[in-house]
Amino acid sequence: MMGMSFTLLIGITIAWVDVPIMTLLQREIPAWLLGRVLSLMMGLIKVVLPLALLASGLLINLLPVVVVPLLGGGAAFGYSLFLLRRIKRSAHD
């Protein structure tokens, strides 16, 4: 039961972060560039994913298994907040 709750929490957190980011991107990026920007993002994600899997595999050997997704989620959440603040600041300037 604990594993299912944890998985649900991770899923909700990902949606909570991804939806606002995609909404902001679609609002701020001109329509003629949107496809290119989203393609670039997906390409970067596909490049970074193997590195993240490698790092998580190494971290699982050093830390408890539950801690690794929490670290990854926390890092992604923190970076998302950083980007959102930066986008909001640039919109006000």
Image (cartoon, rainbow, N blue to C red):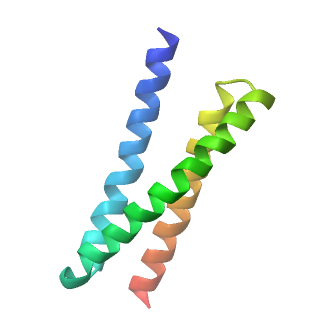
Where residue 14 sits, quadrant-wise, is: top left
Which residue is more in the foreground, 55 or 28? 55
Where residue 84 appears, x then y in whole percent?
A: 46, 67
Q: Residue at x 40, y 34 (%)?
A: 11
Where residue 36 appears, x then y in whole percent?
A: 29, 76
Q: Can residue 77 be seen in this view?
A: no
Which residue is more in the foreground, 74 or 57? 57
Where residue 56 sits, quadrant-wise, is: top right
Which residue is more in the foreground, 31 or 86? 31
Residue furthest out toward the top: 1
Which residue is more in the foreground, 14 or 62? 62
- 66 left or right of 10? right
- 67 left or right of 31? right
Q: Which residue is drawn at 41% across and 51% down?
A: 17
Q: In which quarter of the image is the C terminus?
A: bottom left
Q: Which residue is drawn at 29% across and 79% down?
A: 29
